[in-house]
């Protein structure tokens, strides 16, 4: 069945959520969420960043902006998988699929005696880490892979930026 342009636009138009209409709109929203996170490192901004960043993929899929295989390859990147993990954990509180164990989190503070030596310089604030269950961890003595949250957010945004450039989005 062939649709004319107006008919297709009406159908796609019903998918819009206020002004978020394209993958680029979601990338820019992710950028704003990252700005909030960087300015005020708070759980609300962490939650919003990872939910928004992961769901850029939904906008790309919905309008078939790139080949499915290319998007699937990108989504297998470790940082993007970690982003999805945090997105799902934030939305669902407890992850129930057997292959997705719940990560643990820790907030280190730079007050003397509140973090192991070498984690943070004294008086520099906080460092948030998530510990992902992992059998791929190069340290055979632990089953968890630590990831610093703020650095992960920066890498995720950089990777989405590169993906958009590489695919002309």
Image (spheres, rainbow, N blue to C red):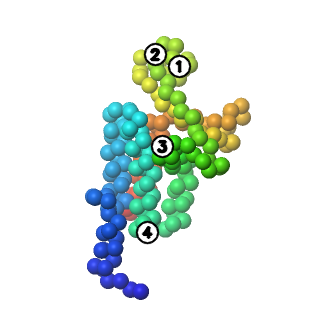
- Graded by Cα atoms within 10 Å as few (under 14), some (14 to 19) or many (20 or more), the crowding at tag 1 reads some
Question: Where in the figure is residue 112, as x and y percent of width and height?
Answer: 48, 13
Circle count: 4
Give the CA distance from mark 2 to mark 3.
Answer: 28 Å
Which callout, 4 or 2, points at the residue further toward the start of the chain? 4
Residue 33 quadrant: top left
Question: Where in the figure is residue 13, as x and y percent of width and height?
Answer: 30, 69
Question: Where in the figure is residue 2, as x and y percent of width and height?
Answer: 38, 86
Which is nearer the eye, 30 or 66?
30
Residue bearing mark 4: 64
Question: In the rendered view, does 135 fall on the left or right side of 18?
Answer: right
- Residue at the spot x=48%, y=31% of the render? 128
- Residue at the spot x=62%, y=43% of the render? 101
- Residue lying farthest bottom? 1
Q: For the residues labelled 1 and 2, say whether their Cβ atoms are less than 8 Å apart.
A: yes
Residue bearing mark 2: 111
Judge depth for marks 2 and 3 and give the one in front: 3
Tag 3's secondary structure? helix
Which callout, 2 or 3, points at the residue further toward the start of the chain? 3
Find residue 136 and name its label: none
Q: Look at the picture and state if 164 lies above or below 100.
A: below
Give the CA distance from mark 1 to mark 2.
Answer: 8 Å
Residue bearing mark 1: 115
Judge depth for marks 3 and 4 and give the one in front: 3
- Residue at the spot x=41%, y=35% of the render? 43
Find residue 90 and name its label: 3
Give the CA distance from mark 1 to mark 4.
Answer: 47 Å
Residue 41 quadrant: top left
Which callout, 3 or 4, points at the residue further toward the start of the chain? 4
């Amino acid at each position: 069945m062939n649709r004319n342009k107006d008919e297709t636009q009406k159908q796609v138009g019903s998918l819009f959520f206020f002004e978020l209409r394209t993958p680029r709109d979601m990338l820019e929203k992710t950028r704003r969420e990252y700005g909030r996170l960087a300015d005020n490192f708070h759980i609300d901004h962490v939650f919003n960043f990872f939910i928004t960043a992961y769901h850029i993929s939904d906008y790309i899929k919905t309008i078939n902006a790139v080949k499915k295989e290319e998007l699937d390859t990108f989504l297998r990147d470790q940082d993007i998988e970690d982003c999805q993990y945090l997105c799902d954990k934030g939305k669902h509180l407890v992850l129930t699929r057997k292959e997705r164990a719940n990560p643990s989190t820790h907030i280190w503070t730079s007050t003397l005696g509140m973090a192991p030596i070498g984690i943070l310089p004294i008086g520099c604030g906080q460092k948030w880490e998530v510990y992902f269950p992992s059998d791929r961890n190069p340290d055979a003595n632990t089953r968890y892979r630590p990831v610093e949250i703020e650095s992960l957010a920066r890498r995720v945004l950089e990777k989405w930026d590169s993906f958009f450039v590489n695919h002309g989005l």
